[in-house]
Image: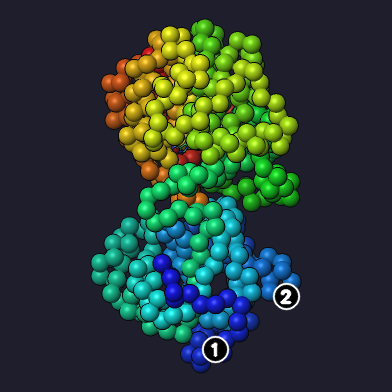
Amino acid sequence: MTGGGSGPVGDRRVEPFAARLHIIPRVIIKPLQTALVRVFRRYFEQAPGWVLLTTSGRRTGLPREVLLPCERWAEGMLVISTYGNRADWMRNMRRNPRVLVTCAGWAVAAQAEIVEDLDAKRALVDAHPFFAPAPFALINFLHRTLLRPLTCAFLRWWVNNRPVVVIRPQRAAAPSDATTALQNGRASVTAQRAALLRAAHQMLDHPPILDDPLALRLIDPAGAEALRSGTARLQTPALQALRVSIALRSRYAEDRLAAAFDRGVRQYVVLGAGLDTFAYRNPHPDALRVYEVDHPATQAWKRAQLAEAGIALPPSLTFVPLDFETETLDAALRASGFRNDQPAFFSWLGVTMYLSREAVMQTLGLIAATCAPGSEIVFSYVVSPSQFAEHAALVGEPWRTFFDPPALQADVRRLGFREIEDLGPEEANARYCAQRADGLRVGGSGHLLAARL
Ligand SMILES: C[S@@+](CC[C@H](N)C(=O)[O-])C[C@H]1O[C@@H](n2cnc3c(N)ncnc32)[C@H](O)[C@@H]1O
């Protein structure tokens, strides 16, 4: 987007006089910034319209944090440097354009690009004129209608003497068409995050909702190091609620799987398995076959992680690489030894939002049409986007599909499923969190749906 308008990084510039005009002196703004960062970390990490940027100190190389207003969009963020090139973070960034952006509780490695060409800067602020994002719908509306020309005119003037910085998460190499990171052959980062939160759940939440002793072994060394070096940043209310929902969805699926096993079901298919560990702590290794179905890129990465962690592949496990968007589940499963004439239990956790509606419905339809009576599925879905959708988009895995619970239940019934149970956050909390002394609860709009054939 910035194309030829990007400025070189690393050279010293002479500041135009206008960029030296500050309303608030720097001796005041610096301690204010530090205090703001603390408040942001504690309470507002999910706040839209702001970014916590970590640069490397140009002399010390140590991390330096600054809280900045920004415009976010799917591929990155746009920041205008109020203090021009004199701002410390700008100077740090000129020395080292590799930065971290903290968004919804996660620090994401990113590359900063300083734009100095005036036409390029103006084009950028015209396209992203710093509108207040939701939830202030009325302000959004006013901005987008009445205030847009004024805001654009002001910003076009404002950037005359100020650099504009485009910050792009490095792992979000998704091109501007709708190609996702997985389609580009990269393993799922959201799977890594879910695993990190399951591991954090084992360390931080007592008693755990999901007892998963392998979770800590399976996360990558950087994630393990982050957990060892401090978990305070995982204790924001939003991240607590997220990790509870990730643990709870697996617990719910495994509870229902145990009941299905008691009924005689002997095949378990983990759809979009990510770093799920059930197959490696299977309580019935001689009786229950486990099929892990996942995108080939994620599955190859998981196998490397397993080898690195020294976790043996049990003979009861079969890997089934599959892209839900382009391949059909029944053919891939059959080719892997799955028995259509015997009932199976399926889980599909934290996946449907990343797929097209067609792929979700087609997969459910195939299970309904080809699996034996007595088969069951538990899957999670979301009703509306959350702040974590923004982060997922930043790493190239946008949320694409949302469901209305009554309409989805009707569709699932029409496909041939029965005994449908739909757990929204309230029901999930009542079932799994009511007795907790630590007050942990799931939040957001995630649902769990169980249905049988
Ligand atoms: C957020 S992770 C959830 C992983 C795991 N179920 C869990 O609960 O930790 C999303 C998973 O969906 C998989 N996925 C996303 N799009 C996919 C596709 N088109 N085909 C196959 N798998 C896909 C990813 O590879 C990843 O493992």
Q: Which residue is mark 2?
A: 59
- The residues tagged by marks 1 and 2 sit, at their Cα atoms, a distance apart of 21 Å
- Secondary structure of the residue carrying numbered label 2: loop
Give the residue drawn at x 60%, y 61%: 100
**Position above or below: 253 against 14:** above
Which disc is residue 396 wearing? none
The outermost residue toward the bottom is: 17
Image location of residue 351, percent across then percent down: 46, 35
Looking at the image, residue 398 sits to the left or right of residue 109; the answer is: left
- Residue 145 lies, in percent from the top left, at 25, 67
Question: Which of the two labelled residues, at mark 1 and mark 2, occupies the earlier sequence position?
Answer: 1
Residue 302 horizontal/vertical position (percent) = 61, 35
Q: Image quarter for residue 313?
A: top right
Q: Position of residue 323 (x, y in %)?
A: 44, 34
In this view, the residue in front, 119 or 300, is 300
Residue that lies at the very extreme toward the front in this rendered image: 335
Q: Say what amino acid the circle numbered 1 marks.
A: Glu
- Quadrant of the image containing the C terminus: top left
Helix, strand or loop at mark 1: loop
- Residue on which disc 1 sits: 15
- Report which quarter residue 366 is drawn in: top left
Q: Residues within 10 Å of mark 2 (few under 14, many from 20)?
A: few
